[in-house]
């Protein structure tokens, strides 16, 4: 029998996990569960990543973690257990399915507009690296990582999944009009992968426009793939379209380890009262069954759940307020009593061909994911981020004195807007500038040349950070300032 690791979590976690396992037991789901110690309570015992070494080992051996929500301890420097788990095990794709559920009243269900949207969110990169620094007392900087291999992993997964589910359309949500290098890379990879799937209709929408379209015509969308932060926001928006977080399941997919969990948190306000809605965790568990190829049981449980919802049985957080709500235990009993029944609307068919095979295998070293580049790389300049509260012209005069024979000062910008050699006195300034130097006459530069300039410039300014300006062939690997 397949064994999976189970972490019950904090707050309502143990209640809803027990509820789901009760449903699985009644359905004779052929799974064995190994409960692992993970969550805020483990953190409180002194394990800084929120899990015991035994829990980590079990999860890495079994390859599947079914988890309840976990509280993020409040306080400086403490990272979320949930985010740590997703990142440590490289579950690069977060898949969330949002569907109209018969019996769950929403604006769209009343208007007769069906929703069936799958959001695939990149799960590792972006600002979620949490690599942040205060560069001056006024200026905070977050590093946003978008990588080619990371984008490829999640986008390939999204296309493969869309193909399997016979999707009508796959859409990339992005902000590449503003973040031309980072989101531009994500979008470029999207269209590279799209070429391998000529039968799928692939298109892209700028994320703000996407939000507007989702709340007006959600039925036009099928699979949507996004970077981490934008995906986070858009998926909560979609949860709202189908009735709220209580109905939002999620699967964190990696090549070796997968984590199935509800989108919602620990709901501390209702914990311990036996009134929580287990639907989202149950839907996540059903996704796990499908992932493991336990298709028949998945269909029985899902149809019983959908039938129960259609009958108007509801926990206190949703449904017809005129009809008395049931508690978690009663909700579970109702689902179990409905095994074998299917809803009138939206019944799930048994699809053996949707079967996925698990690919868990042991690794003995970290995988290096690297793309080869054919073009010659050349250092053509450097950006120095300096602290100063002087006017741009005064900074320019000092910088030019340091430029020497190899560099020329190209421009100065503040918060990404050029303020020298041209600019506007109406541009407000903060005490951190980006001064850009490039090589004179395309003279090839070395890191030593850049260090020489660094040392010289540091005589006048505090240098907060620096970035090399690179050319690959004739392609610029850096952005221009607004107005440059
Ligand atoms: P939350 O999702 O726990 O609660 C928001 C609201 O929704 C509350 O009113 C709550 O009662 C209600 N709610 C949530 N799930 C429900 C359910 N199954 N049945 C009925 N009502 C439900 O979000 P909040 O309050 O922002 O976060 C609480 C804690 O959960 C925090 O420590 C947070 O870090 C953690 N969290 C954990 C997640 C995870 O484990 N994946 C995801 C989101 C938050």
Image (tube, grey):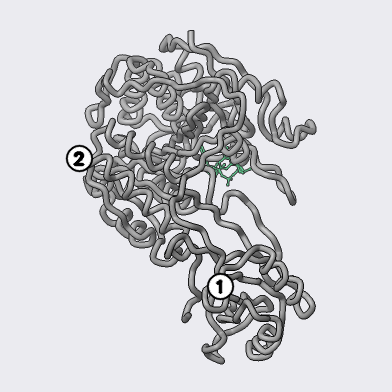
Q: Quadrant of ligand 1?
A: top right
Percent coordinates x, y for residue 358 in the rendering: 43, 21
Image x and y of residue 452, in percent: 72, 70
Task: Identify which residue, 39 or 256, lies in the foreground.
Answer: 256
Where residue 58 appears, as percent x and y from the top left, is 63, 19
Q: Residue at x 66, y 57 (%)?
A: 132
Q: Earlier in the sequence, mark 2 or mark 1?
A: 2
Looking at the image, residue 256 sits to the left or right of residue 294; the answer is right
Find residue 427 and report its image quarter: bottom right
Residue at 70% in and 43% down: 73
Camera-nearest residue between 283 and 57: 57
Q: Residue at x 51, y 35 (%)?
A: 91
Residue located beneath label 2 in the image: 199
Q: Secondary structure at mark 2?
A: loop
| Local secondary structure at mark 1 | loop
Gap between marks 2 and 1 measured at Cα: 48 Å
- Residue at point 62%, 78% (across, down): 407
Does the numbered disc 1 mark a residue whose Cβ is under 8 Å from ligand 1? Answer: no
* Label 2 neighbour load within 10 Å: few <14, some 14-19, many 20+: few
Using a 10 Å C-alpha cutoff, classify the residue at mark 1 as few (fewer than 14 neighbours), some (14 to 19) or many (20 or more): some
Q: 376 or 1, which is in the foreground?
A: 376
**Tag 1 residue:** 443
């Amino acid at each position: 029998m397949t064994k999976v690791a189970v972490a019950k979590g904090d707050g309502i976690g143990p209640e809803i996990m027990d509820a789901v396992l009760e449903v699985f037991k009644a359905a004779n789901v052929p799974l064995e569960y190994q409960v692992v110690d993970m969550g805020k309570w483990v953190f409180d015992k002194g394990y800084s990543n929120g899990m015991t070494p035994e829990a980590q080992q079990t999860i890495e051996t079994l390859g599947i973690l079914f988890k309840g929500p976990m509280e993020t301890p409040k306080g400086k420097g403490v990272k979320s257990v949930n985010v740590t788990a997703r990142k440590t095990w490289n579950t690069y794709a977060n898949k969330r399915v949002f569907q109209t559920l018969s019996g769950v009243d929403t604006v769209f269900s009343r208007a007769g507009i069906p929703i069936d949207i799958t959001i695939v969110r990149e799960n590792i990169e972006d600002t979620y690296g949490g690599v942040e620094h205060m560069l001056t007392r006024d200026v905070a900087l977050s590093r946003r990582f978008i990588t080619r291999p990371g984008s490829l992993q999640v986008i390939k997964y999204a296309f493969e999944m869309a193909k399997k589910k016979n999707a009508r359309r796959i859409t990339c949500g992005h902000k590449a009009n503003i973040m031309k290098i980072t989101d531009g890379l994500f979008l470029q990879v999207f269209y590279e992968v799209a070429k391998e799937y000529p039968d799928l209709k692939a298109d892209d929408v700028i994320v703000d426009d996407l939000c507007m379209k989702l709340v007006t015509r959600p039925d036009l969308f099928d699979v949507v793939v996004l970077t981490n932060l934008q995906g986070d926001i858009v998926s909560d928006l979609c949860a709202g379209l189908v009735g709220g977080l209580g109905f939002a399941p999620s699967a964190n997919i990696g090549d070796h380890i997968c984590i199935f969990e509800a989108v919602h948190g620990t709901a501390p306000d209702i914990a311990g009262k036996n009134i929580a809605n287990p639907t989202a965790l149950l839907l996540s568990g059903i996704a796990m069954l499908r992932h493991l190829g336990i298709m028949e049981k998945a269909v029985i449980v899902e149809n019983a759940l959908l039938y129960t919802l259609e009958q108007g049985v509801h926990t206190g957080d949703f449904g017809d307020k005129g009809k008395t709500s049931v508690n978690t235990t009663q909700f579970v009993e109702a689902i179990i009593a409905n095994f074998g029944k299917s809803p009138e609307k939206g019944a799930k068919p048994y699809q053996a061909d949707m079967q996925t095979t698990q690919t868990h295998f042991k690794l003995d070293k970290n995988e290096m994911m690297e793309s080869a580049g054919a073009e010659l790389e050349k250092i053509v300049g450097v950006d120095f981020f300096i602290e100063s509260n002087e006017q741009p012209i005064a900074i320019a005069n000092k910088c030019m004195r340091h430029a020497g024979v190899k560099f020329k000062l190209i421009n100065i910008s503040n918060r990404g807007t050029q303020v020298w050699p041209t600019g506007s006195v109406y541009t407000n300034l903060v005490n951190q500038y980006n001064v850009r130097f490039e090589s004179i006459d395309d003279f090839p530069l070395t890191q030593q040349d850049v260090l020489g300039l660094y040392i010289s410039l540091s005589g006048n300014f505090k240098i907060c950070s620096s970035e090399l300006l690179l050319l690959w062939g004739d392609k610029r690997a850096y952005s221009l300032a607004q107005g440059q």
